[in-house]
Image (cartoon, helix red, strand yellow):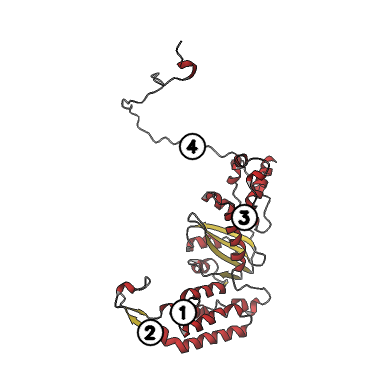
Amino acid sequence: MTRAAQLDVFIAWLMGSSAQAQYGSSARTFRRTHAWCWNVDPVIGVTGEIYDEVQVDGTYLSGGWCLLLAINATTGTVIAWQWCDTEKTAAWVALLERIPPPRVVVTDGGSGLASAIKVCWPHTLVQRCLVHVQRNVRREVTTRPRTDAGRALRAISLALTRIRTREQAAAWEVRLHEWHQVYGELINTKSYLRDTRLRPAWARSNATWWWAHDRLRRAYRLLERLTRQQVLFTYLRDDLDGLGINSTTNWIEGGRNAGIKDLLRRHRGMTSDHQRRAIEWYCYLRSTKPAPPSSLVRPEHCKPAPTAVVITDNDPTPGDYGTTATADEGLWARTGWAGRAH
C-alpha cells in the first residue's frame, strides 16, 4: 500500500505542474523517496481491436530520440508507441506489426512509413495529411511566390483543406491538370550548369544540366503523384461514408504531440532516460482503459538487483613490487586515538 501511494504521488507530480516540495516534504526527500518509481515501465497491452482510423506520426526529442506514435482517431487514445533514432522502415514495422490492420491510416508521408505500411498493412487505405501536403508545397514555392505559376500552384494547394465533397475533389483535380497544361513547358525547361558548384545535392554527380525551375517542378510533381496514387481524398470515399475519416493528423499533432512537448517544458532538466519514462507514462495514461499504475509494480522495481562486479584481471602470476602503501605492511597514515602519541 505504501508503494502504491508513493507511485500515485509520483505520477501526480510527473503529469502536473506543481513543485516537488509541495507534496509534504522537501524536494530532496521527495526525490529520494520516489527514486524507485522511475524503474516502473508502463506497457500498453495488445487488445486485438480493429480500428476504423489510425493516425501515426513521429516526433523528435532532445537527446537524439524519436517517438513513433499511433492513436485511435475516433477517441484520440494512444494505441502503441515505439522508440527509435530516425523514422526508418524497421522502426515503423516494429510499431505497426503490434496493431491489427485498420480500415484507414492517416499519415504525414514520413520516410520509411510507406514501405512499412506495404509490409504490415497491405490492404489498408492511406489518407495523406492535407496540411502536411500544403506545408511541403509551401516549402518549395514559399508563401509569396514571385512567378504567376508559383502563385497559381500555391492557391491550388491552399484549396485542399476546403474540399468537402467528391464533386469539389474532382474539380480540384481538373484545376491541377489545367495548371500543367499552361505551365508544363515551364517546369520542363532545362538549364546547363556553367558552374558545377551550382549542381543540387540530389542531382547526379556528373550532371551538366538541371531543371531551370526545380522547386516549382517538385511542388507540382508532389501534387500530381499523390493525385495519381489516390491518397488525397480517401476520406471522401463512398464506402467510408459515415465513419468520419479525418483528412489531417491534427488529432495526434495538436493533441498528443503537443501534450508531450508541454510535459517536457514543465520538467526541464530531466535526463534522457527520465524524459522517455515520463513520455511513456503520459501515453499510457491516455490509452484505452489503462490499468491502475500500482498493478504494474514488481518487486525488482522497488529493490533493483545490485550490479555485479566484473573482475577482468585473470593473470595468476604474482604482481611486481610497487610503491603503493598497503594495510598489510602497516604503512597507512593513522588518525584518531590510534595515532596519538602517549
What count of labels does the image hold? 4
| Relative vertical location of residue 47 with respect to residue 237 in this rendering, above or below | above
In this picture, residue 174 sits left or right of residue 238: left
In primary-sequence order, the first of circles 1 and 3 is: 1
Looking at the image, which residue sits at the far right? 1
Q: Nearer the viewer, mark 2 or mark 1?
A: 2
The quadrant where residue 288 appears:
bottom right
Q: Label 1 to label 4, Cα distance in Å?
A: 59 Å
> Who is closer to the viewer here, 62 or 27?
27
On the image, the x and y values in percent for residue 292 come to 68, 50
Q: Nearer the viewer, mark 1 or mark 4?
A: 1
| Relative vertical location of residue 150 with respect to residue 303 in this rendering, above or below | below
In this picture, residue 210 sits left or right of residue 96: left
Q: Label 3 to label 4, Cα distance in Å?
A: 33 Å
Element type at marker 1? helix
Say what amino acid the circle numbered 1 marks: Arg
The residue pinned by badge 1 equals 221
The residue pinned by badge 2 equals 189
The residue pinned by badge 3 equals 282
Query: Which residue is drawn at the image coordinates 57% and 60% (left, top)?
Result: 98
Q: Label 2 to label 1, Cα distance in Å?
A: 15 Å
Query: Which residue is drawn at the image coordinates 56% and 77% (left, top)?
Result: 232
Q: Label 1 to label 3, Cα distance in Å?
A: 39 Å
Say what amino acid the circle numbered 2 marks: Thr
In primary-sequence order, the first of circles 2 and 4 is: 2
Mark 2 crowdedness (10 Å alpha carbons): few <14, some 14-19, many ≥20: few
The residue pinned by badge 4 equals 308
